[in-house]
Amino acid sequence: MHFTLKIWRQENADVAGGIQTYEVDDISGDTSFLEMLDILNDQLESDGGLPVAFDHDCREGICGTCSLMINGTPHGPETTTTCQLHMRSFQDGDTIFIEPWRAAAFPVVRDLVVDRSAFDRIIRAGGFVSIDTGSAQDANNTPIPKDDADYAFDAATCIGCGACVAACKNASAMLFVSAKVSHLAHVPQGDAERRGRVLSMVDTMDAEGFGSCTNYTDCEAACPKAISTDHIAVLNREFIRAKIGRTT
Amino acid sequence: MELADVPAQPVKKRNRMKLDAKIPEGPIQEKWSRYRNKLKLVNPSNKRKFRVIVVGSGLAGASAAATMSELGYAVDCFCFQDSPRRAHSIAAQGGINAAKNYPGDGDSIYRLFYDTVKGGDFRSREANVHRLAEVSGLIIDQCVAQGVPFAREYGGLLDNRSFGGAQVSRTFYARGQTGQQLLIGAYSALSRQVASGNVRMFTRMEMLDVVVVDGRASGIVTRNLVTGEVESHAADAVVLATGGYANVFFLSTNAMGCNVTAAYRAYKKGAGFANPCFTQIHPTCIPVAGDHQSKLTLMSESLRNDGRVWVPQQVGDTRPPNEIPDAERDYFLERKYPSFGNLTPRDVASRSAKEVCDEGRGVGKTGLGVYLDFRDATARMGRDTVAAKYGNLFDMYQRITDENPYQVPMRIFPAPHYTMGGLWVDYNLMSTVEGLFVIGEANFSDHGANRLGASALMQGLADGYFILPATIGNYFAQLGISHQTVSPDHAEFKQAEQGCTTRLNRLLNASGNRTVDSFHKELGRIMWENCGMSRNAEGLEKALQQIPELREEFWKNVKVMGAGEELNLSLEKAGRVADFLEFGELMCRDALTRNESCGGHFREEYQTPEGEAVRDDEQYCHSAVWEYTGDDAVPIRNEEQLEFEYVELALRSYK
């Protein structure tokens, strides 16, 4: 297959970027999207050009490193990560626009690489259970109803890729924050720090420059792990519960 | 037992390195607890005076950094990814072993110890493995306390499943994403410590060298992957948690960034490298589809719990799998190994798959594949149960291959996956360089010549949460509180920085016309053909000629675009491939000098007429520890003799 690629190139955070056009040929449908970019980079390097910088690592859809707005959609047309997207999802001759995540809180580092360290700072604000190594009781001392455990798991599958932020017209990080808050709100281990956690994480989210949620749920549609916006409802509930004080 | 007629090369015993494993006295069940009671301690208010560098933020690195910080040490943690949460431990799917015996099926610490020693084909250190089995249960307790959502039964208690190489169900799991959930647990513990100010986290930083001053590891040199700056970082101890080197094969299940650089640089600074030829080829990966392929995708070995592995009985049977009747299928693992069946250990399953493909009975377009069939499991348990257990793996398979595994059997083929070899460490997890500790996959300690499924997560977290934080205190206590941290302005640091910068410039100025990837692919082909699933002396000797030639061409003819003072992915890759080009040679040398077959190391010359591996316990019941002697010199092979007091050295049989 042949594709025309319109790719965002930007040398670093301090200079303006722009779209450049490239052509790739002889791409098989079994080639993954990132392998197609490998082929382009090989071509560029062979011609003495600079390869397109993009983030990627595991290429199995689990590490959350890869990103890319593909034709305006985070991770492209399928519900998966860019590394698990294959060129068979496109038509021969297609023109494909490839841009970095677009959010003020995710500044561009180079080309398609953005800085998502704001997510780490949100987790540091409370996305953990304070338990020192070695002080845990036997794992089976606290049964957890399977439904709760499964619900917590659904939230915990978040890979921290940032597609939810990129999809949102407000660049809100509510789905990311809610995934962690909801995960820890549905297991008893998270209970002791429940109130402080949600307040602190939401404060940090605001301070990092993420926007507010206006319930368009584009984040859920873009999430490669199909995390439900129900968790945002949980986040809101946890937030209100924390704000009005202890209700137990 | 008959051996192929091959002259064994005499093994020269010329130990130059001091390899004192420091295994404590006493019965094996008591070694660790007794030893812990004797370890010197550092007073709580003095702990903050000691700074430790942790390189890597996977299960081992993140858990070690978090725990040492909780204890009060000052920790600097480095990773090359943009966040510590992205380390490759995240991709582990199947599970984590622990001798909890919750199912009451007869498991015990001894059995986990025994299975691991046997699974490793008697090339691991008994005392280390026993300790691993002892702490395995604590890991589960710790992770559950962090809120890790392990799979549970309807009664709310934890669920277990079985895994290759074991006859009990001792594997805890979190759907097919156990590594992710455990890593996020360790990452959250680490995040808590970063928030406390006790851990300084450095992301997008790659370690280029370890700095040794007066015989002690005193810091590292890094390259900031965003700005290109080469910097020194000093500390009182350095911990490498930098993972394995399966990417030497180019195509492997490792993440694209996984590399040997940190471990190899340490080797060049005096750390012995043990058993580099012990690599694991994982049986259940998705077969290669074409030349464009950048990596191989693993599917959890847990699939072998319910899936049945087969190929057609007849060579050249190209009928679609569902049209081949049972009588004309060869369920070769069940046939050859009736008591373990589809759950034979990885090395045995991989080799069996290669054998049937070599006979021409492989399936798929390339003939390099075997079927993994869920037809019978679906009939037995129903589609919903199969989907609940394996749904995400089936989805992944379908996304990659465009085939529906609920309807058509999956095709699988072995792929490089894990490396048992690594930097040599003693019982304290310290390498042959004082103050340089190595944990997780980066060390060589616990898996011998073959790792059992669900044991990598166990070892990474055992090292990081429970073992290193205890033993490193002893090292600091010996240093004493009057110990002064070496200044990063010390001449050794400046020299190391200079060396790194010179090398980077050499890569940038090579101005040849071949891309880095083309060299990596060629190296990968040489390694896969000659030092892959099976090896022989002729092939290894050929590889030992080809690799130096390729390396020479690399330095003359590589093309690295861009500049040093910026984010430069070609330069990053080039540095890693340059190290693989040296390391590959060491691997082949190790494989050539181990004249036996054991675990993942299958030398064709040493097999029974039925094709089973033949160990040589007379001559090779040891770990080979390689010592660097200069770029143009042949490294020295040292030996650490292995003693088996509690598990009888026996032929490993899974029949």
Image (tube, coloured by chain):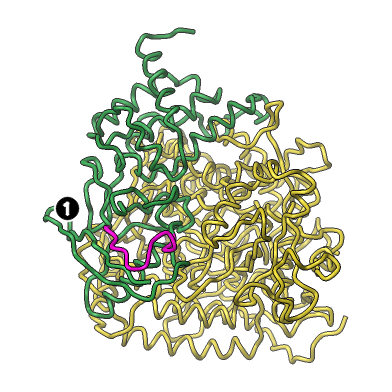
Chain colours: A green, B yellow
Q: Nearer the viewer, residue B56 or A219?
A: A219
Q: Is residue B128 magenta?
A: no
Q: Tell me where residue A36 appears, x and y as whole percent.
A: 37, 67
The segment highlighted magenta reads: A86-97
Q: Quadrant of residue A53?
A: bottom left
Measured along the vertical axis of the image, is residue B513 above or below residue B267? below
**Which residue extends farthest left?**
A15
Residue A160 falls left or right of residue A148: left
Question: In which chain is the residue bearing label 1?
Answer: A
Q: Nearer the viewer, residue A64 or B169?
A: A64
Query: Residue at the spot x=22%, y=78% of the render?
Result: A48
Query: Residue at the spot x=48%, y=72% of the render?
Result: B250
* Neighbour tally class for label 1: few under 14, some 14-19, many 20 plus, Cα within 10 Å: some
Q: In the image, what residue type sits under mark 1?
A: Ala
Residue B369 falls left or right of residue B333: left
Label 1 sits on residue: A13
Query: Residue at the spot x=38%, y=41% of the render?
Result: B74
Quadrant housing the N terminus of chain B: bottom right
Q: Tell me where residue B267 appears, x and y as whole percent.
A: 47, 70
Residue B116 falls left or right of residue A243: right
